[in-house]
Image (cartoon, coloured by chain):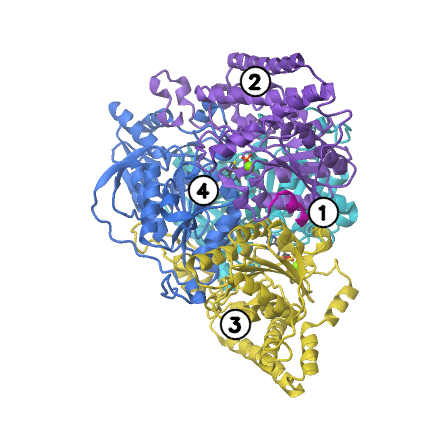
Chain colours: A purple, B cyan, C yellow, D blue
């Protein structure tokens, strides 16, 4: 079942095409600079929660999303900044979300693990490993029933393929021949557990054999190869040919999350993969193809850097998500149709005595544990 | 909160989030006839599907088989396999698919054959459906209806007889209804289909074959409103699901003994209609809370708590009494199965005892 | 990955071996007669609940369990009478269980869907489709860790392979190379949904490809073929070679359960499969091999019939599971160590007002709905 | 109930069910030192593993990584990968494997990284582990320990911050404990490992780094027994998990104002120690029930219900007050996250208000 995709001799796409090359490179730089900024803000204690960075994996998100049409959809993961950016989200409301601002994509309610520009066709990041796969499949079923012609891409990691959700959703996609592309970003680890240990098969792609659709493995650090393989899978999906499992081989440079001590992988392995930098590789190809000049590349870098800087600066100044407003009408946040509004007596959510500290001025207002 | 885009809209991305909650038409007087609870559920689905092609049903054996309890019946014949969709045995997958469909312009109803199998799908119900609207800051919502029969009494034993409403009622972001009669089975389901949020509709196996008057028209029963099918003066029974009819039967028997009981049908567990329920308790000062589910940390615990923390406490003439299922799995043997959940006799006995306390 | 097993030229097993043939035939007859009796009791309103009969599938349970050694274990399903009998359970406590007697294997608490002779190595039937697979895999892990040398067989249906539980458990079995045999009894339907519709692959066996262990499909109505394939899989498991997915092709003659109207399959299909009766087929082989005489076959039939009759008669007379005793100490039924016994103040389970009808004499004592 | 066969027994089938619950040794006075909650959990596991080779730990990243919250730490180094087993991301599979191991002579501890992911495994927890002993008529039992951290306060948002104890407490056949301090984290876990039934141990992310005196020896804290870490006269705070320390802090602050509060640490949610909890409430006549989980249909609903249906009702000087998490998913933003669950200030304010009512 496994086919190994080759990058096509790109004509109107790839490093040789100035417009395409610039766009892809810019997307990859946006992702990298955005995540570097996030990493930095985190290190400086200015960001809350945890963070899963996709630095090193930019070519996968970029190559796949480049293969999508405007109305197509994606479902993303805990490591979802790159997918979000590649699917066209603005950096400002993304950064605002991570900085817990009211102007964030999720109004400060979702944070990194739920970030999405819904209007751009992102069905949501997902804090649950494998959680987005059945959702993407359901969305693909809706596209098929509604005849929209849209394709849904579902991103997930190698580790997610060990979840029952992957299996059930892949099977549904297969039997109903849905317009969905299952993109497994294989970065060799699910947290600390390597694919060698978590599976007894050599590739994720061959798991497609259990469902009867193609499984394709591709160099996930080669944006052109990813694009080519994704283009083929998207065309198959759009043409009624059903799903594809696309495995993009890549690597995360950073730890799994903020608490990772990297005890499960060697410095050599990390160094080796860092040497296969998807951005540097693609720049080299662009220069080789002569489609963009050194100056133009520098322009892309500057643009990404400036956009991220602006996003940080502007969102820093934006108003915080407001706990008073939230507490005043929590049901409006929890439900699309909060009851109590049209049914007397039924209150969906009552603040019932919380938020005392908001009215207090004492320093003890913030309790130790909630920091 | 979301853009007004019709289902027929051709552009995919905005349409994916373009579902606009239909606002329920004002309830109209309408002709009624007596049909079964299960027919009422089917009629609600059929009318909703006929009126709105965004409404689809999916579940195991809902097609030609007609549903594990025969509820979907002829819907497959009427609407075809695309809209009345048989699925593999993959509860997590199909609820998740329902979530994805709900996010993408459809109004899915997912049937789970026995509510016990929601265990398989809890991630999609709780971590996804219930939270997506909130987590996305309101940018999308999930108009998903999850239908599942609960309850014991059919000899199906521990893994096919649970009453799990407490879990769902405890989960922020879900609305939870338990229709106790045919009319509510239809009316609450229609409201659930209208609702822009995920609604868990817990039907009851033993009620499927019971009958009652049901409006011919698609008359909604509002989510969030309890009913008081009987008013009395001595004590107030608060009940859910199959216990409502047992309480009504018990109340009729007690009447003969000179004990006059109100019966409250909670109908909607979340959001909870405290006004109606506590109001009815206040009227008599004695509360008998009756459910099939185990007592410990249950829905009736909540009703008791509402009393204990409100002014109703001061109107109590006796301590609250909960009559609930045993904190035990449901056994197979009919004689054991019968004693682990309240029967009419138990209700009568508990009511008599309560009426004389204090 | 798929290998098709052939029945070996049996020497000390199979139709040609009088002892083996008699034993296998007796087991199949026991299963058939037991389930016919159950079907009959049900039709006469003397049995409660629902019932999933394996009539037509006897060769699968029998052939697989014949390949097991004394200490080996099985995990079973909702359609589990055959597995239970084939693994050596007594018919009397089985029938007593179904008749809600205190002397039943589960003391009337489990019924058909939970029936098991635990002492004979049956980890339990299971009312949850796919529910037993992770449990069997865990038991196999325990056997491996403890060095018992035992093998665990897990039975499940074709429909169960669409559950996430199958996928997760199969993967665990693979990566840890556990001594487990996953036996999929493919009777072409999961309730009403055919395998053609529920999977986009031709066989269940090929799903093993996703896990990296052998998948074998065998004629599940041929007890010798099942035995041969199971023997090979059990030997592999016991020898440290890891799991096998064994697909036994069979058919249930009766409806899925008591409420099945058989709308999803044709009369012709049913007739065709009934013609492939595993018992009649095996009898013909025995006679062909000349290992047992006609009279000896009749002796087997009589023995099975009499055993089942005795089981019905004796269990009918046994005392019912007693609700009073149950209510007197429900915690003893729910917990192996009921608290309250050793911790003052903590009561694990309180009857709190149930069982009133037990003390009442009025005919209203049994409520309408609970019948 | 089961045959007495040692783990070392060579014959597989009887040994498969041969686990005999170790009876807890009488608690002995023992030397103490201050260690963290997370060290206490690790110490309990390490001592149990050293004492009994049937005890094994499995979970995602419990090996070299040391656990998502660092709880298993060096156990992998000490006991090796067979007994401290890393697993794929397959919660349903690994809990199920735990059930199978528990049925087959081992004493498995399964760690779920965040209690939210028990959603994936509900079938094995609820339909299997909780019911097997019952459904098999007592012929087998499931000595499984399920450890999982719950709670908010780390900015992990809606899918990583839930407090799901009500679900487990409501499920017949499960025992449920929520240690609130380091000593209980060790002592309750040791009891859970001893216990022949499935025990759900809900730890708390914010407590992992808190410290307290813990006995060096493997001293058991009995399952089913609440603690009363502080006795006062004006009101009684009943709390679970991380709220216990918040209540203690609040009580200390209130003391300065002349309000004297008892604090009850429930510790075991099932079976519930009604005697201790209601006794402490009776002493003051005012009950403030404090939990992090949402209020609706929750554990504190049960405590309120126990009051409302008992003699304690007559001793109340004021209505019961529940101070709980909002009926909302947990938001990401720290300023929002903080207001959806009770903080020390909220406890102080609620206690002050309660102390003057009535
Ligand atoms: C159901 C579930 N189990 C466990 C986790 C904890 N967790 C978060 S990310 C992760 C690893 C995921 O691995 P993979 O799918 O390969 O994605 P990657 O992180 O490598 O991008 C784990 C175990 C989770 N969030 N959800
Ligand atoms: C998790 C779960 N989902 C659904 C059911 C209802 N159900 C019981 S048996 C069955 C069909 C099972 O099909 P298969 O696995 O092929 O076994 P068979 O009945 O054919 O032996 C279904 C859907 C169940 N018991 N458990
Ligand atoms: Mg990975
Ligand atoms: Mg089948």
Q: Secondary structure at mark 4?
A: helix
Q: Which residue is mark 2?
A: A103
Q: Residue B330, how many percent across, how many down?
A: 50, 56
Quadrant of residue B187 within the rendered picture: top right
Badge 3 vs badge 4, beta-carbon distance below 8 Å: no
Foreground: D335 or D77?
A: D77
- Mark toward the start of the polypeptide (1 vs 2): 2
Foreground: B224 or D327?
A: D327
Q: Are marks 3 and 4 on the same chain?
A: no
- In screen coordinates, is D44 left or right of B109? left
- In screen coordinates, is D316 left or right of B355? left
**Residue labelled 3 has its Cβ within 8 Å of some atom of ligand 2:** no
Q: How dense is the environment of label 4, judged by Cα within 10 Å: few (below 14), some, or many (20 and up)?
A: many
Mark linked to residue C88 = 3
Q: Which residue is mark 4?
A: D166
Question: Does B227 sit above or below residue C132?
Answer: above
Q: Secondary structure at mark 3?
A: loop
Q: Which residue is mark 1?
A: A175
Label 1: chain? A
In whole angstroms, how far apart are the C-alphas of marks 4 and 2? Answer: 35 Å
Q: Is residue B169 magenta?
A: no
């Amino acid at each position: 079942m496994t086919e190994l995709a080759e990058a096509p001799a790109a004509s109107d796409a790839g490093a040789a095409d100035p417009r395409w090359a610039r766009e892809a490179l810019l997307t990859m730089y946006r992702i990298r600079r955005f995540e570097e900024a996030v990493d930095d803000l985190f290190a400086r204690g200015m960001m809350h929660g945890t963070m899963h960075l996709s630095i090193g994996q930019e070519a996968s998100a970029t190559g796949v999303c480049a293969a999508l049409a405007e109305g197509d959809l994606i479902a993303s993961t805990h490591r979802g900044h790159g997918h979000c950016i590649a699917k066209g989200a603005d950096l400002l409301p993304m950064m605002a979300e991570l900085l817990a601002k009211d102007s964030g994509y999720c109004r400060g309610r979702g944070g990194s693990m739920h970030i999405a520009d819904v209007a751009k066709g992102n069905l949501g990041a997902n804090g649950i490993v494998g959680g987005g796969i059945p959702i993407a499949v359901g969305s693909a079923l809706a596209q098929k029933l509604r005849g929209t012609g849209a394709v849904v891409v579902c991103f997930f990691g190698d580790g997610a393929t060990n979840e029952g959700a992957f299996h059930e959703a892949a099977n549904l996609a297969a039997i109903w021949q849905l317009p969905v592309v299952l993109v497994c970003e294989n970065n060799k680890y699910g947290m600390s557990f390597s694919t060698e240990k978590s599976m007894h098969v050599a590739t994720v792609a061959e798991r497609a054999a259990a469902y009867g659709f193609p499984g394709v493995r591709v160099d996930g650090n080669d944006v052109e190869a990813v694009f080519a393989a994704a283009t083929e899978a998207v065309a198959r999906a759009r043409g009624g040919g059903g799903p594809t499992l696309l495995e993009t081989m890549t690597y995360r440079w950073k730890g799994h999350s903020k608490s990772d001590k990297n005890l499960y992988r060697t410095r050599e392995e990390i160094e080796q993969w860092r040497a296969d930098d998807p951005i540097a590789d693609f720049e080299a190809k662009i220069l080789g193809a002569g489609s963009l000049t050194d100056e133009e590349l520098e322009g892309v870098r500057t643009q990404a850097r400036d956009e991220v800087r602006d996003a940080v600066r502007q969102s820093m100044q934006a108003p915080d998500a407001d706990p008073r407003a939230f507490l005043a009408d929590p049901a409006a946040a929890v439900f699309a149709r909060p009851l109590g509004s049209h049914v007397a007596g039924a209150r969906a959510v009552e603040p019932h005595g919380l938020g005392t500290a908001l009215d207090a001025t004492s320093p003890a207002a913030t309790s130790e544990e909630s920091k | 909160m979301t853009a007004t885009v019709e289902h027929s809209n051709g552009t995919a991305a905005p349409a994916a989030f373009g579902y606009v909650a239909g606002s329920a038409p004002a309830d109209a007087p309408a002709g009624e006839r007596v049909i079964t609870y299960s027919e009422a559920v089917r009629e609600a689905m059929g009318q909703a599907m006929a009126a709105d092609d965004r409404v689809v049903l999916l579940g195991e054996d809902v097609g030609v088989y007609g549903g594990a309890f025969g509820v979907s019946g002829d819907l497959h014949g009427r609407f075809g396999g695309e809209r009345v969709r048989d699925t593999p045995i993959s509860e997590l997958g199909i609820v998740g698919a329902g979530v994805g469909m709900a996010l993408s312009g459809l109004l899915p109803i997912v049937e789970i054959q026995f509510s016990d199998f929601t265990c398989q799908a809890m991630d999609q119900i709780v971590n996804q459906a219930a939270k997506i609207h909130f987590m996305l800051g309101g940018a999308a919502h999930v108009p998903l209806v999850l239908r599942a029969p609960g309850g014991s009494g059919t000899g199906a034993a521990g893994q096919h007889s649970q009453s799990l409403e407490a879990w769902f009622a405890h989960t922020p972001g879900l609305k939870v209804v338990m229709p106790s009669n045919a009319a509510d089975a239809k009316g609450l389901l229609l409201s659930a289909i209208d609702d822009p949020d995920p609604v868990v509709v817990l039907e009851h196996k033993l009620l499927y074959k019971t009958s009652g008057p049901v409006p011919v028209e698609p008359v909604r029963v509002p989510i969030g409103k309890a009913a008081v099918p009987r008013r009395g003066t001595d004590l107030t029974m608060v009940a859910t699901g199959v216990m409502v009819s047992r309480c009504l039967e018990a109340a009729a028997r007690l009447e003969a003994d000179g004990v006059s009981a109100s019966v409250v049908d909670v109908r909607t567990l979340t959001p909870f209609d405290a006004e109606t329920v506590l109001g009815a308790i206040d009227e008599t000062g004695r509360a008998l809370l009756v459910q099939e589910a185990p007592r410990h940390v249950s829905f009736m615990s909540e009703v008791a708590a509402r009393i204990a923390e409100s002014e109703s406490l001061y109107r109590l003439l006796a301590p609250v009494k909960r009559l609930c299922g045993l904190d035990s799995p449901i056994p197979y043997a009919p004689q054991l199965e019968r004693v682990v959940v309240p029967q009419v006799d138990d209700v009568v006995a508990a009511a008599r005892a309560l009426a004389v306390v204090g």
